[in-house]
Amino acid sequence: MIYFQSLTKEELAELLRPVSLPKARRRYVPEGAAASAEEAGPSTEDLLKAERRARYRAQQIFHWVYQRFVTNWDEMSDLSKDLRVWLKENVEIYRVTERASQQAVDGTHKFLWNLADGKTVESVIIPAALQEKENPEQDFDQQRFSGAAIEDKDLKSERWSRLTACISSQVGCAMGCKFCLTGIQGLDRQLQAHEIVGQVFELRRLAPITNIVFMGMGEPLHNFENVVKACKILLDPDGLNFSKRKVTVSTSGLVPAIEELGRQADVSLAISLNASTDEQRSQIMPVNRKWNLDALMSACRSYPLGSHRRITFEYVLLKDFNDSLEDAARVLRLLRGIPSKLNLIPFNEHSGSEFKRPSDETVKKFQRYFVDRNITATVRISRGRDILAACGQLRSIFGTARGTERHRDWKSNSGAGGGTAF
Ligand code: SF4
C-alpha cells in the first residue's frame, strides 16, 4: 500500500499512467510474438492519451482529498469504477489519530497525534485575533493582556484573522538546543512526508487554517526530503493550496540545507537565532559549533526572497543571558542587509531547563530598541500558557501512555508553557 499523502500530484499521475491506458492495451505482448490488433501493446498515441488522462485523474483525486476532505474512494463519484477499485487496492489515505488535545483560554489548541507505529507527535493551532493583525507591533502590555481568557474559542469563528498551524517534522530532535524540551528528549525518528502532510490534513478538517509553520517538534532541515515533498503538496493549487508566503520553514541553522531549500522549495524562512555572539550561541545551540553566525547570516543573505518577503528571526529571551541592550545592538548588526523581522519570545520556564524568563520590563526595553530603529519586532506571548505549550511538553506527558485521552480546557497546568516554538 502507498500512502496517498506521500505523493505529489506528479508522482500520483505517474502511478496512474498504466491504469489510464485502454484496458485492451494494458497487456504486455513480447516483441516478435504474434498479436492481434486487440492484444497489441500500447501505441504512442495510446501512451500520450494515458498520460493526459492520468494527469487529469490525479488532479481530480487531489481535489477530492485535499479540498473536499473526502477519505473514502467510493464517494469520489466522478472517478470510474475501475479506478476506484484500483485505488482501494493500492493507495491508502493516511490519517493520524488524536491521542490527546488541550485548548487554552486564549484559543490556542494543542494536539498529540498517534502515528501508525505507536509514536506520537504534536501540532498546535494558534489563532490570532483581528486586532493583532491590525497592529502587529502593539505595545507589549496590550499583547500581554490579549492572552486573557476568550469566551468564543471556536476555531471556526470569524473573530480570528489568522489561524496558524504549527507542525512537527521529526519525532523528537537531534539538535540539542539547551532551552528546548524536545531537544532534551533527543531524536527518535524522521517523519515521512505523509505524516507531515497528515497533520495539516487533520487540522485543516477542523479549522480554516491560513498559515503553516514548521516550528513544532524537530529540525525540519534535518529531514530535508520529506519536508520539501510535504511543502510541495501544501503549496499545490490542487492540493492544500497554501500560498508560499504562508508556509514557513524554521531552522536552527543547518547552513547547506538552507541553501538547498532556497533552490528546491519556494517557502518562507525563519531562523532560530537566540544569541548575539558565537560564544553565546554555541553554549545553547550546538549547531553553531559547526556553522557559526557568519556562515548562517551569509546563507540568509543569499536566500532567494521574492519581493516584499522577509526572513523571520526567532529570539528566545533568556534572563541575564541574551537579554541586554548590548545583545540587542549586536543582533541589529547581524541583521544588517537582510530583509527581516524579529520575533521575540520571552522564555517560558520548564523543569527541564535552568534558564529563567526575563522581566516584562526587560522584554519591553529589548523590543523598543528595535522598534525605535524601524525594525519590525514583535513579542510573541507564549500562547496557551495554561496548557503544556512548549514543544515536546504534551508528548512528554502522554507520549508513552496508552489509549486515547481527551483533555479539553485543561486549566490546571498554569505554570507550564514556553520553549521555542510557541
Ligand atoms: S529548538 Fe528546535 S532545533 Fe532546537 S532542539 Fe528544539 S526542536 Fe530541535
Image (tube, helix red, strand yellow):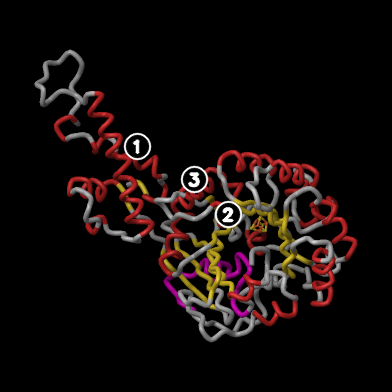
Between disc 2 and disc 3, whose residue precedes? 3
Locate residue 298 relative to residue 215 in the image: left or right. Answer: right
Q: Quadrant of ligand 1?
A: bottom right
Q: Residue at x 47, y 77 (%)?
A: 157
Name the element at disc 3: helix
Provide residue 345's location: percent of width, then percent of height: 72, 67
| Cβ–Cβ under 8 Å for marks 1 and 2 | no
Is residue 199 shown in magenta?
Answer: no
Locate residue 358 relative to residue 418 in the image: left or right. Answer: right
Q: CA distance from mark 3 to mark 1?
A: 16 Å
Q: Which residue is mark 3?
A: 229
Above or below, comparing residue 11 to residue 227 in the picture: above
| Cβ–Cβ under 8 Å for marks 3 and 1 | no
Q: Residue at x 53, y 77 (%)?
A: 159
Q: Which residue is mark 1?
A: 14
Q: Which residue is mark 2?
A: 245
Q: CA distance from mark 2 to mark 3?
A: 17 Å
Looking at mark 3, is its residue's CB closer than 8 Å to ligand 1? no
Task: Look at the image and give the residue range highlighted in magenta.
Answer: 386-407
Provide residue 382's location: percent of width, then percent of height: 66, 72
